[in-house]
Amino acid sequence: MTWTLPDFDGLLDWAALAPWVESAGLPGRGPVTEVTQLTGGSQNNLFLMQRGETRFVLRRPPRHLRTNSNETMAREARVLAAIAGSNVPHPRLLAASTDGAVMGVNFYAMEPLEGFSPAGQLQGRYATDASWRRSMGEEFVRAAAALGGLDYQSLGLEGFGRPNDWHGRQVERWRSQLDGYRDTPGYSETSLSHVDEVGRWLSDNVPSDGRIGIIHGDFQWPNVMFSLHAPRISGLIDWELSTLGDPLLDLAWVLTSWRERGDPEGGAGAKPVVEPWDGFMSRSELIALYGELSGRDMASMPWFFVLACYKLACLLEGTYARSLIGKAPKELGDYLHDYATWLMAKARQLIATA
């Protein structure tokens, strides 16, 4: 019976959830008979549930809600509903509760995806077949181009972000994020070297040919599921940072995790995110393929690459700052600070050759 299922220390309220499962039109028949908490994701909770012969995944906010946790759940459900039926690989939204009426928090259910999120040693034929690894780069670009090619207005996503002067606002937006760490004991505004230099270059070189579309916002290895049956992406996951912006930033986000000869040496960022690394497309090949698929002039791509380095470094410094006061593991904080420092070095390298 449903109330005998684990509630994971109160994360699942079965007295409220069981009737919702019955009424929400989820696939399967009868009550949920099995539930497993999935790993992955740094903040939100995922549960794989069995109902009859079918399975679905329920996603809800963390136990200790942040100020925007419920809004984030609603935004994720909104964008997944909007891109349904498109050629963007994503988990199909099944149902959502976005008014807090069921469990006191917003949550949604989606179809499970086959495959794995790459990190460290690759799995299956990706580990043994260089052609499969090359396909991973192609799949990243195809997914990014597909998402960036959608018309957000026709999909009902007006108001999903702030498109006005998006390019001109980026430096101030992410510098203010970094400035917010100043009051953390032990953190200094000089902790991240060259951030002002990089920010000035970005402000002085804002591209004039920008576009606005849907962006995933965190388009990187942990947020992509690759199929084990064929060299393809089965879905983009973790849409919590999705918004409106220039889709080239998603491609640039991918480039920050790509490694090739000539990159800055040393530090956490110098090591490939996945291994083995031989066989992967070069960054220039990724950029060329995106231009071919999207029809965009890619001449301003260095600016977006520098912006991605700048933005990601500012975000990673947040975990480093929290680690200084015991709110994040010290080892993780030190690693991400080292990575942020590498990103600044990469940004300066790009600026020098732009």
Image (cartoon, rainbow, N blue to C red):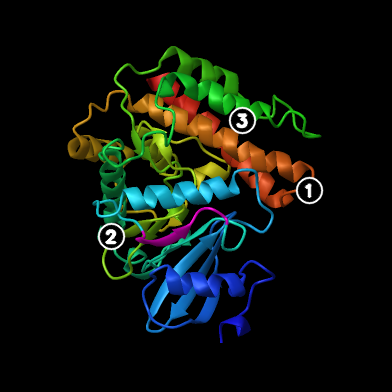
Identify the residue at horizontal 77%, vertical 34% (top origin).
Answer: 184
Marks 3/2 in contact by CB < 8 Å: the verdict is no
Residue type for callout 1? Gly
Q: Picture coordinates of residue 226 (x, y %)?
A: 35, 61
Q: Earlier in the sequence, mark 3 or mark 2?
A: 3
Q: Picture coordinates of residue 104 (x, y %)?
A: 62, 58
On whether residue 56 falls in the magenta region, the answer is no
Taking depth in this image into account, of 19 and 55 the one nearest to the observer is 19
- Find residue 326 and name its label: 1
* Magenta span: 91-100
- Find residue 232 and name its label: 2
- Find residue 177 and name its label: 3
Residue type for callout 3? Gln
Residue 239 seen from this side: no
Taking depth in this image into account, of 13 and 89 the one nearest to the observer is 13
Q: Which of labels 3 and 1 is toward the front? A: 3
Spatial separation of the CA atoms under disc 1 and disc 2: 40 Å
Spatial separation of the CA atoms under disc 3 and disc 2: 35 Å
